[in-house]
Amino acid sequence: MIAEDITARRALEDELRLRARLFEPFFTTKERGRGTGLGLATVYGVVRQSGGFIWVDSVLGQGTSFTLDFPRAADVGDSRSLPAEQRTIPGAGEPILLVEDLLSVRTVMREWLARNGYRILEADSGETALKLTDSFHSSIDLLLTDVVMPAMSGRELARRVQVLRPEVRVLYTSGSTDDLIAHHGVLEAGLSFLQKPFTQQQLLQKLREVLDHGRPFSIG
């Protein structure tokens, strides 16, 4: 009986820990390569940006249900009245070069950016990104690149892009540890960086910040 109680308590503790991370971006219980961990995080972001709430009700062995509650349209009001951290300024067709070697992550980021008004060029490697940079006949406003990629790091890619496009701004992303990021030279003063995991709103706000206030990078 005591053993059964301990087992039940551990199962409950595991469930509570899982619930606490349920809406965390990039958190998934699926095996590597089978899930992005962005589905529920995206839903949560949309619900919260709309001024709503989301609840989860789960019974071990029976299933899970989600309840979404949105305000009436008349109650939302002008978005300008929202706190600054809740506002999302859409793009105006700015060309963004998105470089991310993980297809699942790249796909989600592309969808986030495209539906918020940005024109997206995407690449799965530094080599492909350089070819796009060289062949694209219009301007590229910003390079959005992961730091740690096979064959060519994001920092090396940025250096080589500047040779072709001196005016390009750069926003780095990574889910690696601080030591690894520092090793790749991304914590240098003046460089823009967004730590994974991040939400759609965090990405859009940081992107807008770099586009509006950032300066083109220079080769160090």
Image (tube, rainbow, N blue to C red):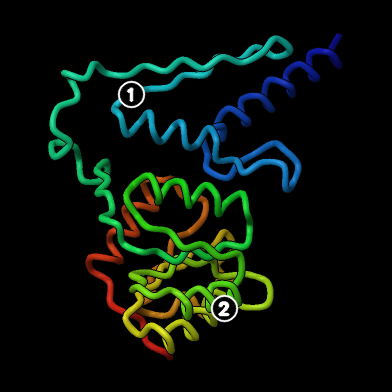
Crowding at dot 2, Cα within 10 Å, few <14 / some 14-19 / many 20+, comes out as some
Residue at the location (60% across, 64% down)? 124
Residue annotated with mark 2: 184
Residue at the location (74% across, 12% down)? 61
Residue annotated with mark 1: 52
- Label 1: which secondary element: loop
Placement of the C terminus among the 4 image quadrants: bottom left
Give the mark nearer the N terminus: 1 vs 2: 1
The relative height of residue 19 versus residue 105 in the rendered view (above or below) is: above
Residue at the location (47% across, 37% down)? 42
Residue 153 place in picture, x, y as percent: 59, 76
> Which quadrant of the structure image shows residue 146?
bottom right
Q: Is residue 58 left or right of residue 160?
A: right
- Label 2: which secondary element: loop
Amino acid under label 2?
Answer: His
> Which quadrant of the structure image shows residue 191?
bottom left
> Which quadrant of the structure image shows residue 127?
bottom right
Placement of the N terminus among the 4 image quadrants: top right
Disc 1/disc 2 C-alpha distance (Å): 40 Å
Amino acid under label 1?
Answer: Gly
